[in-house]
């Protein structure tokens, strides 16, 4: 996941901000790995603060009509979705995690992509992936699988 936006406005969290990440499980319970950066996250723990955040890379792609559109790109940081992402096409091994960007964290919001990038994040709880084998079995048998 790579954060891009046409605007760059630094924000400080006054209260927690709810967001979502797509991850894969690890062999340790309640521990997950991000898909792109391969960061390790534990439910209930604030991940280490990203030092030297943000490293902003201005991009200057040409528009279709030849005009230039300045776009900002931040690679390092905790990337997350502002709203529950679509599960269409999501691999059955992936897990959606509800997260919190904690108070006093630095973050940026991309209105174009409805995404955040922040210097801190805390995993809060799993959100069921409707494409997972567990969810499919629950629908098939119409009762929770433990």
Image (cartoon, rainbow, N blue to C red):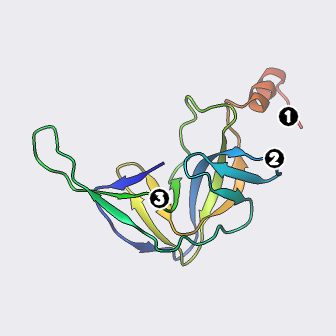
Label 2 packing within 10 angstroms: few (<14), some (14-19), many (20+): few
Q: CA distance from mark 1 to mark 3?
A: 33 Å
The residue under the point 74% across, 64% down is 44
For the view shown, which residue lies furthest in the left direction?
66
Q: Is residue 114 left or right of residue 97?
A: left
Among the 4 quarters of the image, the one containing residue 24: top right
Q: Is residue 30 left or right of residue 39?
A: right
Dot in front, 2 or 3: 2
Q: Nearer the viewer, residue 26 or 5?
A: 26
The residue under the point 59% across, 33% down is 90
Q: Is label 2 in contact with label 3 (beta carbons under 8 Å)?
A: no
Among the 4 quarters of the image, the one containing residue 64: top left
Could you tell me which secondary element the residue under label 1 belongs to? loop
Could you tell me which secondary element the residue under label 3 belongs to? strand
Dot in front, 2 or 1: 2
The disc, 1 or 3, on the residue closer to the chain's N-terminal end is 3
* Above or below, 141 relative to 29: above
Q: Which mark is residue 116?
A: 3
Looking at the rendering, in which quadrant would you find the C terminus? top right
The disc, 2 or 3, on the residue closer to the chain's N-terminal end is 2
Where is residue 40 drawn, in percent x and y?
Answer: 68, 57
Where is residue 119 drawn, in percent x and y?
Answer: 52, 69
Q: Which mark is residue 27?
A: 2
The residue under the point 53% across, 54% down is 80
Among the 4 quarters of the image, the one containing residue 137: top right
Q: Which residue is mark 1?
A: 144
Q: CA distance from mark 2 to mark 1?
A: 23 Å
Where is residue 126 drawn, in percent x and y?
Answer: 72, 49
The disc, 2 or 1, on the residue closer to the chain's N-terminal end is 2
Label 3 packing within 10 angstroms: few (<14), some (14-19), many (20+): many
């Amino acid at each position: 996941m790579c954060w891009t936006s046409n605007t760059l406005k630094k924000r400080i969290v006054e209260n927690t901000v709810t967001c979502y990440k797509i991850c894969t499980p690890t062999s340790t319970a309640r521990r997950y790995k991000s898909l792109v950066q391969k960061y390790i996250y534990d439910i209930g723990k604030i991940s280490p603060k990203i030092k030297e955040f943000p490293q902003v890379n201005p991009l200057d792609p040409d528009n279709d009509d030849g005009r230039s559109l300045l776009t900002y790109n931040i690679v390092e940081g905790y990337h997350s979705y502002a709203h529950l992402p679509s599960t269409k096409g999501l691999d059955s091994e992936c897990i959606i995690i509800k997260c919190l960007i904690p108070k006093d964290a630095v973050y940026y919001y991309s209105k174009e992509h409805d995404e955040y990038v922040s210097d801190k994040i805390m995993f809060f709880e799993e959100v069921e992936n409707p494409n997972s084998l567990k969810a499919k079995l629950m629908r098939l048998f119409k009762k929770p699988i433990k």
